[in-house]
Image (cartoon, rainbow, N blue to C red):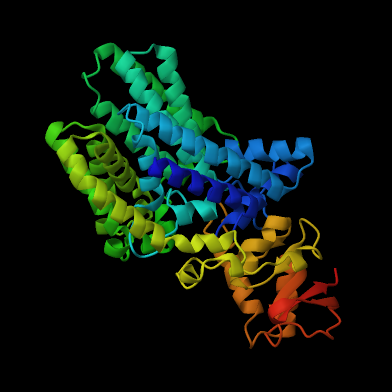
Amino acid sequence: MPASACVLLLAVLLLLMTVRLPWSGDLGMHAAVLERLRADPLHPGNPLVDAATPSPYYSPWAVLLALTGSATGWGTFTVLRLGALAALVLLGTGVHAFVRTFTRSRAAVPLAVLCLLLLYGVRLFAWSGFPGLTSMSLTLAYPSTFAFGLAFHLWALLRRALAAAWGTTAFLGTGLLLAGILLVHQFTGAVAALGCAAMLLGARPWPARAVWLRVAAAGALAAAVPACWPYYGFYSLLGTGSGLDDIHRPLYDHLATKFCLTALGAAALVLRARRDRRDPLVLFFALGLAVFAAGGLSGHQAWGRILPAVLVPAQVALALETAGAGRRVRAALAPLTAVALLAGAWTQAGVLGYVLRPQAVPPVLRHIHTVALWPRFTWAAREVPARQTVMTDNYYALRMLPAYGPYTVAPAYPDVFLPDAARRRAATRRYFARDASRAERLGILKEYRVRWVLQQNGGPGLDRGDPAVRRTVRGPAGFTLSEVTP
């Protein structure tokens, strides 16, 4: 089938991504988490700065990967590649298992995969926790991808458990799985929880009282396990979303162009709703849309991370209707779906440049907009030993250097568990201020035990000849790395 062949090609492309690990985003944070866990599995401290604070990034999945690296001696990026491969397999098998609970049509699974990867909009969009092709290419090694694979398996297991009235042990297993997803990636955990609610409310026949008691026991387990996780206080994260609203504002921008192709999936949901108003995918979509809209109306833009709960049911519904509806519906939907998928593929075709040499990319695709990859700082990482602190205000260096073991003075990302995060950012700005005195700079370096300063030539800071600077290493793009005397 053409759909199966397309899925095979995309699978090969994503397998190449697990080897390449394109870097344009939070990969450095997840590598830094493994570095800290490998150095001290029990008390890793903050992943980015030299501080003994917990972090929500220390999830069961991260601990498992770190222990794998320690046991095998593999490097952190090798372990991340292994994690990316596991996440890709888990996601693929999860989609297969979930779609099979709705239909036995052989075409439905590959169509669902294509819709999940390509059916978004004509404006490029990439974000962790979204299974689009561009997002997946950049986030395969992220915990969110692994968590999304678990979520599809969870929804499939829950539908089977409800259909066959499984026993208490099986339902407790689904509760434990939901708890794991919540700990691995909190935003995907919220999507998974909404999906579970939709599967329950849409179950046919309506679950008996005994089944609801098992569901309640599973829910209690899902709520209790995160409270016992020793690496961070899971419920301390509640109420901290306002600190994340600014970085999530783009989720509410340009919605029409980013997700216009998904409107075809919404039409498929209308067809399903006409047949069954309690269709699980329809309910899933409605719940996700309600939370997403509430976030936009209330100014809680961090709630926008629930958006996969809107997109996924529409994408899956389109695949199901195109593959398994009546002949007339299929005749209408099939060409429209093909056109929408082609438009989505064209919009995201720039990802080929992540794994191909520029000369190997077809000329017609070379000018398609894509998310640009970041410059590398491996030259600086080779000079700085692990657990030594670097002073820098460079956007990319702040997000990349901790991946190799060093700390930075200021954290690159919002951190609800770091009480002096604002003070650290202010100290970094002051150090690089043009009117800062030498005494001020030396005081900041001493306060944060800074051993290295990364800056661009001509930028404010200590001069190369300053007695506080031991040696200077030149890097590309006008960067210099200076070692500070202890």
Where on the picture, by quarter, is residue 271? top left
Q: Which quadrant holds the C terminus?
A: bottom right
At x 49%, y 43%, the residue is 8
Quadrant hosting residue 246: bottom left
Residue furthest to the front: 1
Residue at x 65%, y 46% (from the top left corner) = 80
Q: Is residue 416 visible?
A: no
Image quarter in which the N terminus is found:
top left
Position of residue 101 in the picture relative to residue 445 (left or right) = left
What percent of the width, then of the height, locates residue 400? 65, 62
Residue 283 image position (x, y, % from top left): 23, 37
The location of residue 179, given as percent across then percent down, is 47, 31
Position of 439 compared to 93: left or right? right
Q: Is residue 302 above or below residue 322?
A: below
Residue 243 x %, y %: 44, 58
Report if residue 5 is visible in the image.
Answer: yes
- Whether residue 443 sits left or right of residue 428 in the image: it is right
Q: Is residue 242 above or below residue 383?
A: above
Q: Nearer the viewer, residue 5 or 100?
A: 5
Seen from this angle, which residue lies furthest left?
274
Quarter occupied by residue 188: top left
